[in-house]
Amino acid sequence: MKFVDEALIDVIAGDGGNGCVSFRHEKYKEFGGPNGGDGGRGGHVYAVADASLNTLVDFRYSRRYEARKGQHGLGSDMFGAAGDDITLKMPVGSVITDAETGNVLYEMLVPGEKILIAKGGDGGFGNMRFKSSINRAPRQKTPGWPGERKSLKLELKVLADVGLLGMPNAGKSTLITAISNARPKIADYPFTTLHPNLGVVRVGPEQSFVVADIPGLIEGASEGAGLGHQFLRHLQRTRLLLHVVDFAPFDDSIDPVAQAKAIVVELKKYDLALYEKPRWLVLNKIDMVDADQRANRVKEFVRRMRYKGPLFEISALTHDGCEALSKAIFKYLHEQHLATLAPVDVDPRFVAVTLDAPSTAE
């Protein structure tokens, strides 16, 4: 299935039905009163977060969604039927924005979450609503109210705990394959990853986290070069970034430090909040570096990068260091989760205090 993470749609809620003017016409009832019913409500348009979806492709080819109108009121005190509602299924992580103003209206973050995105119009009043002691034969009625009409922009931001970023062919796809259940395409040419891939990393029983791999970035990505800039939004909800560096490029003229610095620059240009997220360096393909030179090369890399954060040396191909990396990530995420839990406020009246009470024994 084609991956689509942006779409424009028009949603139109149903108009309310008109009220009715009618009077009773029954045998042996000389003065029949008003019995015109109200119009029915127009159909609503809902959106629901569906965990089984991972793309907005359905909205790329079908842009107009219109709910049914409410039925008009009838005589004999009969109200019009409400119009049928429609429900649009969207992937978890979808952001719904007003296409005209650019304001974010809703974010679908919880599976099964259901929200009203366009309200149907209320039905009009029939003449039975206007009956009073001084107006026994009203001929007033009101038309139904129009339903809401909106032009919306849908944007998918995947929900993941950890995001991978780096140059093309840095080994991100191989890494996510080594540590998770994801099976992205892997090849020896750049830009094999064309859309984000999600994988679940299981560290132990009931211990797991979700990692996202996006297409590789290149210099100038913040201005639109390459493919990765189109998918950087998918890293905005992550809690940790792993900067994967090709530590043993095939071309000797390629400087891993220069490539790593270029990624940092592009990240800062694209989104300062994304740049300020916790970011760990992962030196990949360490198995292709001579063991005698490895320590000195890593030390020189860190010095030139002026990097002081966590550093991991791995080989995604042979899985060396991948288990330690996964455990360190889970430990960090778990500690961050515990830190975000609000402390419980304890009422001082219920705090047990031990006092040296005088003895009552004689």
Image (cartoon, helix red, strand yellow):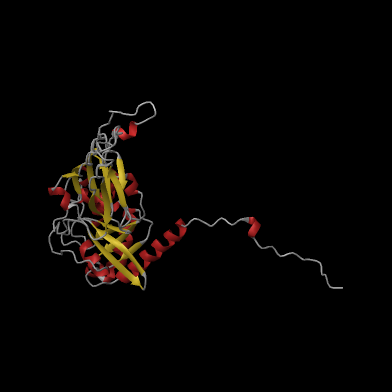
Which residue, as the protein is rendered here, is positioned at the far front?
28
Q: Position of residue 71 (x, y in %)?
A: 22, 41
Location of residue 85 in the rendering, given as x and y in whole percent from the top left corner:
24, 48
Q: Residue at x 32, y 66 (%)?
A: 295
Q: 144 or 244, which is in the foreground? A: 144
The image position of residue 157, as x and y in percent, is: 26, 51
Res 191 quadrant in image: bottom left
The quadrant of the rendering that contains the N terminus is bottom left
Q: Nearer the viewer, residue 243 or 215?
A: 215
Residue 203 picture quarter: bottom left
Number of numbered discs overlaid on the protein picture:
0
The quarter holding residue 2 reads: bottom left
Quadrant containing the C terminus in the rendered view? bottom right
Q: Nearer the viewer, residue 226 or 330?
A: 330
| Residue 130 x/y as whole percent | 34, 31
Q: Answer left or right for 301 relative to 7.
A: right
> Which residue is situated farthest in the top direction here?
134
Give above or below for 192 relative to 22: below
Residue 171 can be seen in this image = no
- Residue 299: in sight, yes or no? yes
Query: Which residue is outermost to the right?
Result: 362
